[in-house]
Image (spheres, rainbow, N blue to C red):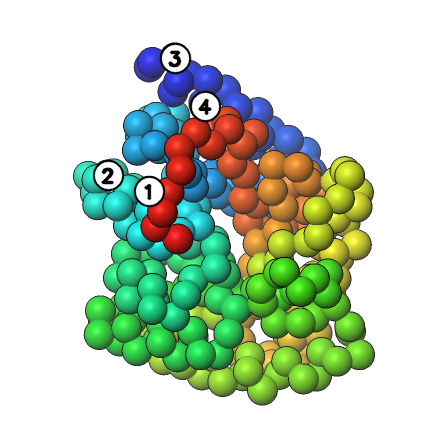
Amino acid sequence: MNELTHLIRERYLSALDKIAVAAKKSGRGAEAVKLVVVTKLHSVETVRAAIEAGVSILGENYAEEGVTKIQLLENCSSVEWHMIGHVQSRKAPLVANYFDWMHSLDSLKLAKRLDRFCAEAKKTLPVLLEFNVGGEESKGGWEAADETRWENLLADVSEIAALPNLSVRGLMCMPPLGADAEFARPYFQRLRNLRDYLTKQLPQTDFSELSMGTSADYEAAAEEGSTFVRIGTAIVGQRHYATETK
């Protein structure tokens, strides 16, 4: 095990320990929270080191960058690749053909394109629906900051749930940046409450997964019911190369 792999493994195991403690506070076992290691803007060598360190789920933000890594590491068949960033409609074929999950489905238009390309690829793609729980204009996802307007979300969610080649599994959010983890906690609670609302309104759809929490606040997210936390810097370190494949 080289130095980079050893360092990533230490950080990875430390994060898993912290997740286990946080999950216990919410009455769950450690296995209830899955760790997505975010490798956007990291080299293939770093990603390979992460895989050798035991990482089993990798998250990428940019479709073309992610596909390049998937192709170069195609012999690592035990790894799941999750798309966690905004995807332009024209990049839908890349996600449909190469990724195992999508956390950031943020529009009905994109859902329909993904469904079409998944049909061509003869696969069903598990997806999480992204909601803007902080009301920020710069953030993607369906507007969900105002709980009194959640009813307006039902039409799109219902239509996506009926698409035959997508499998809705839950919700995802990116809360506003704050000074500490406690700042994000109310937004995690809002997404959890939205999940409960949608489950009640659309009981035939699976909303059991919640993708929330990053390096700065993943322990709070796990305490509030997250089932996927997305950690990059705290495990693989600072990003160190630029990309033009956004």
- Viewer-nearest of labels 2 and 1? 2
Which of pointers 1 and 4 lies earlier in the amino acid sequence? 4
Which of pointers 3 and 1 lies earlier in the amino acid sequence? 3
Q: Where is residue 27 in the image (x, y as percent from the top left)?
A: 71, 46
Which of pointers 2 and 1 lies earlier in the amino acid sequence? 2
State the CA–CA distance, disc 2 to disc 3: 20 Å
Q: What residue type is labelled 4?
A: Ile
Q: Which amino acid does label 3 sit on?
A: Glu
| Residue 3, numbered label | 3
Q: Which amino acid does label 1 sit on?
A: Val
Q: Where is residue 89 in the image (x, y as percent from the top left)?
A: 38, 70
Residues marked 3 and 1 touching at CB (< 8 Å): no
Residues marked 2 and 3 touching at CB (< 8 Å): no
State the CA–CA distance, disc 2 to disc 1: 10 Å
Q: Residue at x 62, y 61 (%)?
A: 139
Q: Name the residue under label 1.
A: 79
Q: What residue type is labelled 2?
A: Leu
| Residue 8, numbered label | 4
Q: Where is residue 84 in the image (x, y as percent from the top left)?
A: 47, 53
Q: Mark 2 points at which residue?
A: 73
Are there few (<14), some (14-19), or many (20+) residues within 10 Å of tag 1?
some
Are there few (<14), some (14-19), or many (20+) residues within 10 Å of tag 2?
some
Which of pointers 3 and 4 lies earlier in the amino acid sequence? 3
Q: Is mark 3 on a helix, strand or loop?
A: helix
Q: Is mark 2 on a helix, strand or loop?
A: loop
Which of pointers 2 and 3 lies earlier in the amino acid sequence? 3
Q: Residue at x 34, y 50 (%)?
A: 245
Q: Is mark 1 on a helix, strand or loop?
A: loop
